[in-house]
Image (cartoon, rainbow, N blue to C red):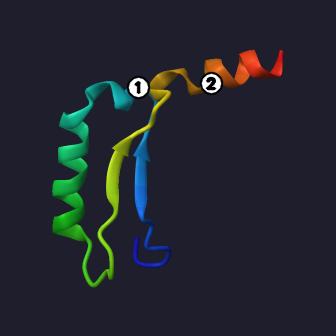
Amino acid sequence: MHVYEPKVILIGGGMSNAGVIITNIVKKHLKEKVFMTKLFPKIMIAILKNDAGLSGTVVNL
């Protein structure tokens, strides 16, 4: 966080099924642990959620 200062943090895979619950937890912990950043990142759920690997496999066939 302190080195790269990302604008967005995407949550994917099985964790993404928790939706708003997981994004709220991540936001809470980041606000407690991260300091002196110019921009607080958006916490978002990846569009493909847990299907990213499956989609990549289908495209490569």
- Image side of residue 10 versus residue 39, left or right: right
Q: Which quadrant: the C terminus?
A: top right
Q: Position of residue 38 (x, y in %)?
A: 33, 82
Helix, strand or loop at label 2? It is helix
Residue at 31% from the left image edge and 80% from the top image edge:
37
The image quarter containing residue 33 is bottom left
| Amino acid found under the numbered disc labelled 1 | Gly
| Amino acid found under the numbered disc labelled 2 | Gly
Please give the label number shown on residue 43. Answer: none
Q: Which quadrant: the N terminus?
A: bottom left
Using a 10 Å C-alpha cutoff, classify the residue at mark 1 as few (fewer than 14 neighbours), some (14 to 19) or many (20 or more): few
Please state which of residues 47 and 32 is positioned toward the viewer in this rendering.
47
Q: Are marks 1 and 2 in contact (CB under 8 Å)?
A: no
Residue at 41% from the left image edge and 53% from the top image edge:
9
Label 1 vs 2, first from the N-terminus: 1
Q: Which residue is mark 2?
A: 53
Q: Which residue is mark 1?
A: 14
